Amino acid sequence: MLRSLRNATLPLALAVAALVLVPAAGHANPRQVTTFEAPSELLDGNTRDQTLDEIRGFGVTRIRQLVYWNSYAPSPNAKHKPKLDLNDPNAYPAGTWDRLDALFAATQARGIKVQLTLTGPVPKWATSTKKDHLTRPSARLFAQFVRAVGTRYGAATDMWSIWNEPNQPQFLLPQYRKHTPVSPGIYRGLYQAAVKVLRSQSANRHDIVLVGETSPRGNQHVVHPLTFLQRMLCLNGSYHRTRKCSKLDTNGYAHHAYTTRTGPRFVPPKGDVTIGVLSRLNSALDKAARAKMIPRGLKIYLTEFGIQTTPDEISGVSFAKQAAYRAIAEHIAYVNPRVALFSQYLMRDDKPRKTGYRYGGFETGLRRSNGKKKPSYESFRLPLAVENYGHSDLLWGLVRPMRAKTKVLVQVHAKSKHAKWRTLRNVTTTASGVYGFSASHHKGQTYRVRWTAPDGTRYTGPAISAY
C-alpha cells in the first residue's frame, strides 16, 4: 500500500516542512504558474468566450494551444509542396488563420497569455515518404511553418514549445528502427530548426522556448521519456556523450506527468516519469547539464496533466478521487522547486465514441462531456490535498483566484451518521495564496475548504478524503 510506504519512509516533521515551501514572505507572485488547455472549446466560436471566462474566473492567466502543422498547411494531402512562400503567413489560403486570430483576440481582451505548441501531424509533402502525415518530417520545411506562425503571432505570445509528445507514434514516426529509438534524433533536428527561426525574429528572440513535451511512459512502441531525453541530447544511459553535438538552446523542459488510476504516488518502471517520481526528471536534467548538453538549472514545465475519471472503466477513477488526486499531484509539483508551471488538461471530457470502446478519449475534464460539473470544478478553484501519515493527516491548499494573502476556512466532517461540518481551522495563507498544516487522523473523516472572494462571493470545495 502506498500509505504504509509513506508512513515508513517519510517522517512527519519532514512532511510538515514540505507542505508549503513558498518564497519569502511578502512576495505576491506565485512561484508556480497554472495553465489550462481546452482545445475543442477554445477554437470553437460558439464556446470560446464562455470557456475563457471560466478559465479567467479560476484565476488562470495562461493557456496552451496546439497548432497542428497539418491543419494550417495548404494542400496537406498532396505529395508535392505548394508553390507559394510558406514563410509568409499572408501567402496562405484565405481563412487559414481565422480560428487562431479569434483566439488571440479573445485572450488578449481578458489578459490571458497563450503558449503555442507547434506540432505534427504534418502535410504529406513535408514527410520523407510522402505517404502519411508523420514519417520523418522535413526540418527545413518545418522551419518555414514556424517562421509563418512566428511572424503572425510573435508579438502576441511569449512562450513556445516544439512538438507534442514526440515520443509517441501518433505524433512522430518512426519511433524505433530495429528496436533502436530513432524519434529522438528526428525530433532534435525539428527542434533545432524551430528554435533557430524563433531566435532570429525580433518579436520572439527573448521568448521562452520549451523542449520535450514528452509523454510519461514508454513501451515497445513508445520511447521511454528518459531514454528520449538522453538520445535527443546525444547521451547514453550513463549521460555520457555518444557523438559530437552542440548544446541545446532551450529555456525549459516540458513534460506530461500523467499517472495511473493507482494515484499520484504511483511508481512506474525505471525510465518513465509520472508525477509521483518527478525527481527522476530533476536528476536527468542535472546530469545532462553536467554533460554540457543543456543549460544548468533548467526549469520543468508540466504543460499537460489531468486525472482520468469514469465512465472510463479502464483508466478512470471516481469523481471524488479525481478531485483528491489532482490536488495531491499539484502539491507534489509545487514543492518541487524546479517546476515552473502546472496544468489542467480539459474543461470538458471528450465526447463518447459512436463505435468500439466509447470512452477511449480523455475524461480528465472538470465537466462531463454533457457539460455537467464534476466535483473537480470547484476543487480546481480551491485545491485541497490531504494525505495520511499514521495518526496525522497533512493538508495543503491553494486559493487559485487570489494568489495573495487571504483567509480560508477549513472544515472537517466525521464519519458518524449524525455528524455535521465543523470548523477545523481558520487559516491565513501566504502571499502566494498557499497554506498547509497537519490534523489528527480519524478513519472516514473528510475535509473541505471555504473561501470568500473580495467581491463577497463564497466558494466551497468538495469533500476530500485522506489518501
Image (tube, helix red, strand yellow):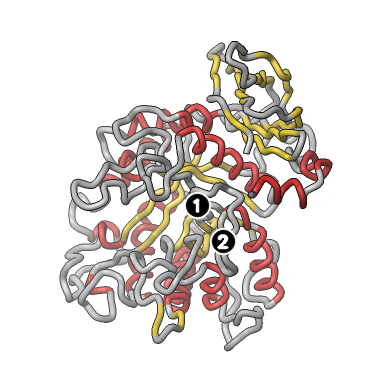
Q: Is residue 329 above or below residue 249?
A: above
Q: Is residue 458 visible?
A: yes
- Cβ atoms under marks 2 and 1 closer than 8 Å: yes
Residue that badge 1 annotates = 260
Q: Is residue 22 visible?
A: no
- Does 58 sit left or right of 82 as displayed? right
User: What residue do we see at 23% from left, 72% from top?
Assistant: 132
Image x and y of residue 105, in percent: 36, 38
270 vs 22, nearest the viewer: 270
169 vs 80, nearest the viewer: 169
How far apart are labels 2 and 1 at the CA level?
9 Å
Q: Is residue 182 above or below residue 70?
A: below
- Does 258 sit left or right of 426 as displayed? left
Instruction: Kindly state the secondary structure of the residue where label 2 is placed.
Output: loop
Determine which quarter of the picture holds residue 163. Answer: bottom left
Q: Badge 1: how crowded within 10 Å, few (<14), some, or many (20+)?
A: some
User: What residue do we see at 53% from left, 49% from top?
Assistant: 262
Give the residue type that dot 1 points to. Answer: Thr
| Quadrant that contains the C terminus | top right
Residue that badge 2 annotates = 268
Upstream in sequence: badge 2 or badge 1 = 1
User: What residue do we see at 71% from left, 31% from top?
Assistant: 435
